[in-house]
Image: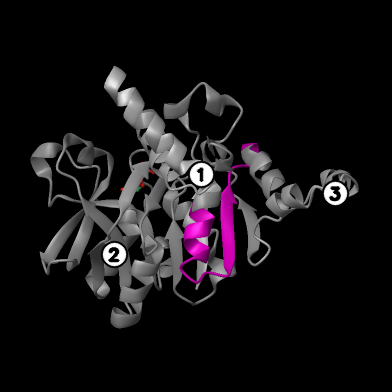
Amino acid sequence: MKAVIPCGGLGTRFLPITKSIPKELLPIVDVPVLSYIINESINSGVTEVLIVINPKKQIIKDYFSRDDELYEKLHKLGKADLIEQLNLFNNIDIRFIEQKSPLGLAHAVYLAKEFVGNEPFCLLLGDDLTISETPVTKQLIDLFYQTSSTIIGVQRCDNDDIVKYGVADVIDYNGKFSRIKGIIEKPPISKLPSRLACFGRYILKDIFRYIKNIGMANNGEYLLTDALGKQCLDSSVFAYEFEGSRYDMGDKLSSLKAAIELSLLRKDFGKELKKYIKELATRI
Ligand code: G1P
């Protein structure tokens, strides 16, 4: 399956650093958030990725392009270990397309129409980072092969943060996956259709014809939620409660927590970090 990763947002919640560095390139120690998201797709069997960027984020393209000068330099110095680190994503085809106006997620997805053709595809939002034994996208793909239906990755959200997300309107609650009749985008707490929040992972099938038929929302954007709502009228759409941790990388505290969890998993200094955190905990 192919994957689409929209990276259009302005990152205003992460100012001031996002004045010059797109939030998708913010590092988790030495690796940008976007690399983790691409790795999730690779580990789920994806071989082609389209990254939708806004024109001010050309630096994202630079990160993924080959730096011949640096390569030559390291080669002359015999630094094979460092060269190894420059060989980013050799086994995957990464392409870019620009979203020239900030017209929303559905608009960003529609730009991928030519890239994906008529096939189902994975959508991974650049804001949402997941950590799990079986990659979240793989969990969704596995369910897609059982149902042949659009799948939306959700998790229970029992706190007030739920109002920041699309929330699934469930018809048949069936433990881990449920058929839905729509998604309510950012509902007030008094009008929650469920406690299942959409956390940025989707397998989309036949979505373009629904996107084509939606209007602009009050906020001036085309919402993917509206297209999915239309699809629910015609065919089964499922919300799947995926396993794993999920972090909002547009939020400062959440991104720090993700950095800690991922760093604890690192082979080079994970153990040292754990020791340090335990020692620090005795002092605070
Ligand atoms: C978008 C979607 C929303 C989803 C969220 C996940 O919202 O519209 O349904 O829950 O991503 O991160 P945004 O974060 O762009 O406001």
Front residue (pair 122, 280): 280
Residue bearing the label numbered 3: 78
Vertical position of residue 32 compared to residue 277: above or below: below
Image point 22% across, 60% down: which residue? 182
Label 2: element kind: helix
Nearer the N terminus, badge 2 or badge 1?
Answer: 1
Amino acid under disc 1: Val
Q: Position of residue 94 (x, y in %)?
A: 64, 60
Image point 57% across, 54% down: which residue? 51
Label 1: element kind: helix
Q: Which residues are magenta?
A: 37-56
Q: CA distance from mark 2 to mark 3?
A: 58 Å
Q: Is residue 84 left or right of residue 118?
A: right
Vertical position of residue 111 compared to residue 22: above or below: below
Mark seen at residue 33: 1
Front residue (pair 12, 24): 24
